[in-house]
Amino acid sequence: MSAIRLLVLGAVRQHGRAHGYQVRNDLEYWGAHEWSNAKPGSIYHALKQMAKQGLLRAHETAPSTAGGPPRTEYEITDQGTEEYFTLLRQALTAYDQKPDSLTAALGFVVDLPREEAVGLLRQRVAGLERWRTTVTEHYTPEDGPEQLGHIGEIMNLWLHQADAGAAWTRGLIERVEGGAYTFAGEGDPFVGVLADGQENPYATGSGHPGDQG
């Protein structure tokens, strides 16, 4: 799964309607340009592509009173909402994807009901445990990585990643079950987007032709 689709759909959904530069600004505010492929070109391409696919609805807006060019605002469709939640659930349960997918999912996990989020995270732990079992069918941790030459370090890495991933996920489950954060249906959610006119302290400041679209 490409994290960019989840990120863009989630950003548009949080605003209700947003033009491309707003989406870019939010993703840079979240630091997504550092830990994912959410670069300006990818963001604007994803917006246009998902509009063609019916996941977003494009609205042409009037030119600004200051004389600026008209922008295209995007709104998530019912199909897009369904895709968004599918991607979110996949990213929370899959243990064999790039880290940016999980990172993106964590930014939107509170869009789910608390019990569902816990259930999905438990599936993640189960997947990591199965992966660990598969590794130990070929590698005995007690004998150390040297048993397979330097190639053993690969399986040693996999084992440590599985253990660390499972431990972190169990900790998150414990915090969520203990009442941490505000999930869907529980009240006003945490506001993670910039208000209109609010300066973005994490903006890259680099221009892109899509900023005007």
Image (tube, grey):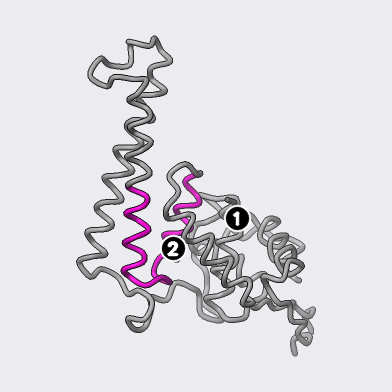
Q: Main structural element of the magenta stretch: helix, strand or loop? A: helix
Cα–Cα gap, marks 1 and 2: 14 Å
Q: What residue lies at 54% left-to-right and 68% top-to-bottom?
A: 10
Q: Secondary structure at mark 2?
A: helix
Residue at (25, 14) in percent of width and height: 143
Q: Is residue 62 left or right of residue 204?
A: right
Q: Please name the amino acid that badge 1 sits on.
A: Ala
Q: Position of residue 148 (x, y in %)?
A: 38, 11
Report which residue position mark 2 lands on. Answer: 107
User: Which residue, given by chain and number where applicable, does mark 1 sit on?
Assistant: 38
Q: Which amino acid, mark 2?
A: Gly
Residue 172 location, x and y as percent? 28, 56
Query: Where 142 sits versus 53, above or below?
Result: above
Indicate whether 75 appears above or below 103.
Answer: below
136 w.r.t. 193: above or below:
above
Magenta-drawn segment: 98-125
Answer with the quarter of the image where residue 11 lies: bottom right
Residue located farthest toward the left when viewing the structure as drawn: 178
